[in-house]
Amino acid sequence: MIIRPEWRLLIDLCFDRCDPAALPDERLEPLADLTTRLNVESQILSRLGPHQQRLGAGAARWLTGLRQQVAEIAVANLRRDAELAEALGHLRVRGIDLLLLKGSALRAAQPGLAGRFQCDVDVLLRRRDLETAEALLTAKGFRLDESFQCRAGLLRNHFHFAYERRGAVVELHWDVDASSPDGFVDRLWRESRELDLDGSSVRVPSPEHQLLFGCLHLSRHAFLGGLRWLADLGAQLPVSGGVGERFAAEARAWPRRAVWSPLWLLGLYGAPGAAELATPSPASPLERLLLRRVLTAVLLGEPWLGLPAWRAAKAVELWLFSQRPFPAVLREVSTRGLFRKLRGWAGDLAC
C-alpha cells in the first residue's frame, strides 16, 4: 500500500518527525483539510508555531488559520465547561465524588491543551451515586440521550450515560469498560490525584491509569478516525519513575492486543518511550506488516486497498478483542463486504 503524501506529512507533523519549514506548498490544501476533518488542529499548531519565522508563505497562511481555528475551539470548550460547571459543582456539593476522564483529564493536567478539540466532558462517579446524580442533573434541565439504547439497555450493556443541556454533554461513567477486571475501578479511585483547575480542585487518574485508559479507548473505537486520540497518548510519553512498571501491572488484566497496538503504532511513529512499553509483541511478523498499513489508513478514516475505513476498522476490532489471526479476520470482513455488493448488484439487475 502506498501512503498518500498528505497522510505521511500529517502523521510526521503530529509526532514531530519532519521539519515544518520544508512543507511543500502543493500539499498544504489536502493536508489542511485532513487536519480539520480529524480534529488535530491544536496538535499541528503546536508543531508549526515555534517555526513561524522559517515557514514558507503557504504554511504561514495555514498557521494563521490554525490559530483562529484553535482559538474558536478553546472558546467552545470554555462555553461548554461553563455550561456544565454549575451542574457538576452541584453534584460535588451534594457529596458525589467526581473523577475527570479522557480529554477533560488531559486538559486539567496540561493547561496548554485548552484548544484541544473536545465534544463532551467525561466524569467517573461511584456506582452507588449514579441514580442520585441523574436526578440532580434532570432537575437542572439535562436530558438523557437514549438514541443509542434505552436507559435499561445502557445500564445492562454499557458503562456510561450521556446527559445533554443546551448542546453541552456530560457523560456519567460508573465504569471505564463494560467488563472491567475485578478491583480495577477501586484502584482507579485510590490512585487518582487532585489538581488545581481555575482555582478549584479536580480529581484525575494517575499517569499509568490515564495511559491505559487512552489505549483501551482508542482500541474500543477500533482506531477509526482516531489520530487525535493517538496523539493524546503520545503526549503522555515517555513515562517517568515507576509509571511504566505500574502500567504494565495494570495492563495484564486487559485484552493484550488492545493495550499493545496503540503503543506499538506510537513506537513506529517515533513517540519516545512507546516501544519499551509495547513489548513483548502479541502479533506475528505477518500481522505486524498488515497492521502497520491497515491501522494507518483506519486512523485517518481512509480506505485501504478499496476497503472502506469502517469495514477495515471492523476487522481491526475483531482482531483486537479475540485470539484470531489478523489475515483471517481481514479476509472474512472483506469477503462479507464483497458478497453484500454482489447481492446489491443482483438486486439492481433484477429491477
Image (cartoon, rainbow, N blue to C red):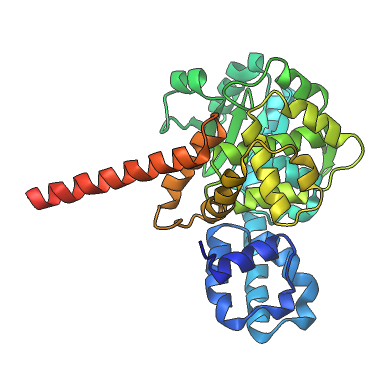
Task: Give the residue at the far right of this rendering.
Answer: 241
Does the image show residue 103?
no
Kindly identify the residue that appears in the image at 59 percent across and 42 percent down. Answer: 120
Q: Nearer the viewer, residue 80 or 316?
A: 316
Toward the front, the furthest residue is 285
In this rendering, position of residue 348 left or right of residue 276: left
Residue sitting at the far bottom: 57
Front-most of residues 46 and 260: 260
The quarter holding residue 283 reads: top right
The mark tally for this picture is 0
| Above or below 196: residue 36 | below
Position of 295 with respect to 198 (left or right) is: left
Q: Is residue 296 in view from this perspective? A: yes
Q: Which x, y percent locates residue 304?
A: 46, 56
The x and y percentages for residue 205 are: 77, 33
Q: Is residue 231 left or right of residue 226?
A: right
Q: Residue at x 70, y 42 (%)?
A: 104
Q: Residue at x 44, y 20 (%)?
A: 153
Q: Nearer the viewer, residue 188 or 250?
A: 250
Q: Residue at x 67, y 19 (%)?
A: 181
Where is residue 226? Give x, y as percent.
58, 49
Residue 320, image x and y in percent? 56, 35
Query: Residue 29: which quarter of the image?
Result: bottom right
**Which of the 4 image quadrants contains residue 280?**
top right
Name above or below for residue 101 compared with residue 158. Answer: below
